Every structure is written in C-alpha cells, then in structure tokens.
Amino acid sequence: MIDIYFLPGTMCDQRVWQQVFNLLPAHITPHYIDLPLESDFEKIISSLSNKLPLNAVNLVGFSLGGYLAALFAIKYPEKVNQLLITANYPSKLPLIEMLQRTLAIVAVEKFGYSGVPLSKIHSTLAKSHHHDQAIITLIQVMDRAGGQSKLLSQLKATSARKNLLPQLIELNIPIHFTYGDQDCLVKASKMQSLDSPHITSHQFEHCGHFNPLEAPQALAKQIEQFFL
C-alpha cells in the first residue's frame, strides 16, 4: 500500500481531488490535507508540518498547493519521499498577476465578494471545457464554500512568491511536474526547459489549469506511474 497526501489550490477543497481519488488503483491510499489559513508562507508551512505525519511522505500539490508542496520539500527535505506538482511552476508570480491580486484585494475589502466571475473560470479552462457545466459548477461551489475570508487570507498570504526551482534542483528526491497545454498560468516552454536528472514532466493535451477536473484520468495515471 502507498499513502499519498494531496494539497488543493486557491479556493479549493477536497472536491477538487475527488475524481482523481476515485480513479486511483486500490494499492494507493489518498489523504487530503486542507491548506492552512495563515498570514504568511512560513506559518503555512509550519502548520502543514503539524498536519502531516512525522515520517517522510509522498506529496502531491495542485496550483497553490503545488507551490506549497515545493516549499515544504525545501524546508523539510527529510519529510518528503517523492513530490508531484500539477498546474504550478514554483516561481515568482508575473507582475500582471500581482497587480490583479492587489486590485482584487482592494475591491473585495471595499465592496465585498460575490463569487468568482464566469469569465475568470473560463480563463483557467481549456477552450473545450468552457461549456462543461459540471466543472464550472464545482469550481463555483468550492468558491462559495470558501467565501470572502478564505479568499482574502489566501491572496494576502501567498502572493509574495520566490523562485523555488534552484532549490528544488538541489534536492535529492524525485520530482514530477504535470501541466495542461492550455494553462494560461503555467507556460509549457518553462516546463520543457527544466533540466535535472531527478525532475521529470508531463503535458496534458486539451487541458487548462484545473488538471484534477479537466484531466482526472490522465492525472491519476501519472500519479500511479510516478509513485511506484
């Protein structure tokens, strides 16, 4: 039996992983870990350390969860056996995204939060999934469940990111990246330029940012093959 611990993305909960969990083979036991709502990365990683077992674990992170999984592995390399990051390139956020986040925080604090716009959801999905109501509804439901306080907490605490690639390359653990060919937040060219004997990557076709929802079967297969 193989135990694997899964982290979600911004404004997501266990439901973002449920399809993948259902598709994993019987010898893999998935464990969901919610992202701690803390004021900065150091406190988030410390809280994650308390949530995870004391022994070294197999870790999977989606989007923000991928960045946090990478940061956790860097801070506690002895606590990670293998690391799979999906839909995240662990580096600084682009200036345009930083600006968008700053404006979003100001707007939400001034006018409140009425939920993620459909246009925002469409921007994160592959074109072929723009009319997939099941995916859209699930994203909206998770967003409503998180609400304004969770959104503000995650935006404020997780926007000041650093480039973690140099430190990840120095780690002596297997690391695997998966990403969608239509992900507007993760550039394929950057993924394909990764050069390290212990870092591998795989691209999903016809997939945007929400890998666990847009390509659950392909992602489950990557997880099964990586965590042998």
Image (cartoon, rainbow, N blue to C red):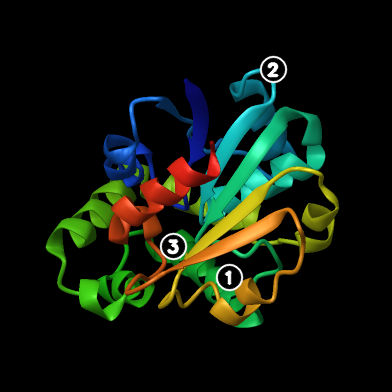
Q: Is residue 8 visible?
A: no
Q: Quadrant of the C terminus?
A: top right
- How packed mark 2 is, by other alpha carbons closer than 10 Å (few <14, some 14-19, many 20 or more), is few
Q: Nearer the viewer, mark 2 or mark 1?
A: 2
Residue 201 lies in what quarter of the image? Answer: bottom right
Q: Nearer the viewer, mark 1 or mark 3?
A: 1
Q: Position of residue 103 (x, y in %)?
A: 53, 74
Q: Is residue 144 visible?
A: yes
- Disc ID at residue 219: none
Query: Residue at the location (69% across, 46% down)?
Result: 174
Distance (Cα) linking label 2 and label 1? 37 Å
Q: Amino acid at mark 3?
A: Val
Residue named by callout 3: 108
Q: Amino acid at mark 1?
A: Thr
Distance (Cα) linking label 1 and label 3? 10 Å
- First along the sequence among labels 2 and 1: 2
Query: Residue at the location (62% across, 39% down)?
Result: 38
Q: Secondary structure at mark 2?
A: loop
Can you say whether 57 is above or below 148 in the image?
Answer: above
Residue named by callout 1: 102
Q: Is residue 69 left or right of residue 195?
A: left
Distance (Cα) linking label 3 and label 2? 38 Å
Q: Is residue 42 left or right of residue 127?
A: right
- Disc ID at residue 54: 2
- First along the sequence among labels 3 and 2: 2
Q: Amino acid at mark 2?
A: Leu
